[in-house]
Image (cartoon, grey):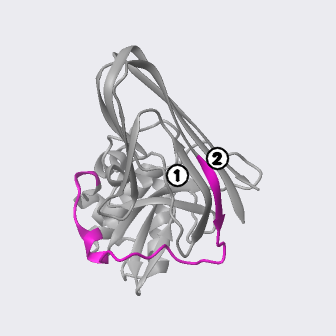
Amino acid sequence: MKLMINHQTHYQYSDWAKNSIQYIKMMPQTNEHQQIHTWDVSVPGQKHIKKDAFNNIWLTSTQREPYQQMLIMAQGIVEVNFENQFGITNSLSPALFLQPTTTTLCNSEMLAFAKCYVDQRTVLNFQKLAEALLNYMPYTTASTSVTHTAIESFSMRQGVCQDHSHVFIAMAKALDVPARYASGYLYVQNQSHLASHAWAEIFLDGQWHVIDVSNQIFRPDAHVYVAIGRDYWDVAPVRGIREQGGIETMYSIVQVLAC
């Protein structure tokens, strides 16, 4: 199925900003799960493209002129293989995704919770853990921010897809199972998906398995991959620095439609 994706990120500043550098990871790649027919990222300034340590496409934009508004827009057409059952493969060792990060640390309470459902390291048991985790911390819009760690989100007993992914990854790694963070888009039939999406994946039996805690989806039927990493900070769609600018406000619009 071909999907048309339009992702707009709008920034506004209370004062003039200048000399900004934006680090953008909003460029999906063709792989065994998806084919990129067209894709473009529109952003002001001088652009440079390279790949990061996880093989994600990394666009850097430098803008010297003063501005008070900025629009970053990514759009294109992606054809998804809905028959695919597993996460995408790459040349990276799964052991890389056992590395701890500040955002995906696991405490004793979280580990005890995980062991209630994963007495043996099977995909089915991890799916049961995902179901229990969603019941324990229901999806709650705007309940957290990107700065929340897995431990903080678990203690709050609520969160969004980013939090679900961080908590699940933390638990999986504590059980000595490689786990990674995937960012991208989700196609929901007859609806416009209002935000970019994140999900977790675990490496078992020689394959990467999708664990989308927020939607209880366990294969990438409706997903478009943009980037993979150890946590949100490895794959953040937009990060940047600037001089001045005052108070920044931001909102995003994302549409994923069949075409």
User: Compared to 35, does 104 lie above or below?
Assistant: above
Which residue is identified by label 2?
193
| Residue 74 coordinates in the image, percent (x, y) | 55, 45
**Residue in view at x 71 percent, y 62 percent:** 2
Please state which of residues 218 and 110 is positioned toward the viewer in this rendering: 218
Which residue is identified by label 1?
197
Whether 240 is among the magenta residues is: no
State the quadrant of the C terminus: bottom right
| Residue 42 coordinates in the image, percent (x, y) | 52, 40
Please state which of residues 11 and 171 is positioned toward the viewer in this rendering: 11
**Residue in view at x 44 percent, y 54 percent:** 164
As helix, strand or loop, the secondary structure at mark 1 comes to strand
Can residue 50 be seen from the camera position used here?
yes
Which contiguous range is marked in magenta?
A: 75-103
- Amino acid type assigned to the residue bearing label 2 in the image: His
| Residue 194 coordinates in the image, percent (x, y) | 61, 42
Tally of numbered discs = 2
| Residue 211 coordinates in the image, percent (x, y) | 49, 67
Within-10-Å neighbours for mark 2: few <14, some 14–19, many 20+: some
State the quadrant of the N terminus: bottom right
* Labelled disc at residue 162: none
Within-10-Å neighbours for mark 1: few <14, some 14–19, many 20+: many
Q: Residue furthest bottom?
A: 205
Whether 86 is among the magenta residues is: yes
Marks 1/2 in contact by CB < 8 Å: the verdict is yes
User: Compared to 89, does 70 lie above or below?
Assistant: above
Q: CA distance from mark 1 to mark 2?
A: 9 Å
